[in-house]
Image (cartoon, grey):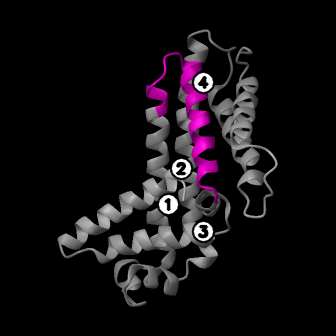
Amino acid sequence: MSAAATELLGTLAAEAAAAQGRGVGTRAQLLHAAAEAIEEGGYVAASVAAISEHAGVATGALYRHFPSKSELFVELFRRAAEQELEAMHAAAARHGTNLEKLDAVLRTYATRALATRRLTWALVYEPVDPLVDVERLTYRRRYREKMAGLIGEAVAAGEIPAQDADLSAAAVVGAMAEALVGPLSPAASQHVSEAEIVTAIVELCRRAIGAPAR
């Protein structure tokens, strides 16, 4: 299991243990169990029965804590999305210029996505309930806003040519998402290293916003 997936599962496991100590651990256990089931086989494998078995609870317990399996997945997606956004904010904070921050955010997203292929595919690309799709759109909007802020600051600092930061950010996020479809797909056959994929994506996005060659 990758470090990023282990990070999410570790966080959920710690919350489950802490909640169990307060006598309210079943909800947290179900979230942790759902993440485990998705990591193993995607949404298709994460049935109510499988989640309940992972959590060590009766099947009906899920519906006492979540209105539906979709609502459980929505909360799980929110947790995972917050973790990824925090990782990108942290990556940007460790660098100086706006272009360096942008590179760090792009590299962090692509690297973590490739490190958690099964989980990322399920959370970002796999067909799911419309409720989860709404959360996906919210996450992409927040990611796009982060990108737009960095692009706008880079323009203001004279690091890249003048441009519509919102439009450029939408194009960059869309290009990255599309570029990762093939490498992340469960059916993908790996012919290129993860490092090469990440570097190619970062360079593509840099060229798209007119960043100088390195």
Circle on res. 151: 4
What is the CA distance from the residue labelled 4 to the residue labelled 3?
31 Å
What is the CA distance from the residue labelled 2 to the residue labelled 1?
9 Å
Check disc 3 and report the residue beneath it.
Answer: 130
Of callouts 2 and 1, which one flags the residue occurring earlier in the amino acid sequence? 1
Decide: few, some or many residues near mark 4? Use Cα within 10 Å; few <14, some 14-19, many ≥20.
many
Picture coordinates of residue 97 (x, y %)?
53, 16
Of callouts 4 and 3, which one flags the residue occurring earlier in the amino acid sequence? 3
Circle on res. 77: 1
What is the CA distance from the residue labelled 4 to the residue labelled 2?
18 Å
Query: Residue 13's quadrant in the figure?
Result: bottom left
| Image height of 73 relative to 165, above or below | below
What is the CA distance from the residue labelled 1 to the residue labelled 4?
27 Å
Tell me the SS state at disc 1: helix
Residue type at numbered disc 4 = Ile
Q: Is residue 79 visible?
A: no
Q: Are marks 4 and 3 in contact (CB under 8 Å)?
A: no
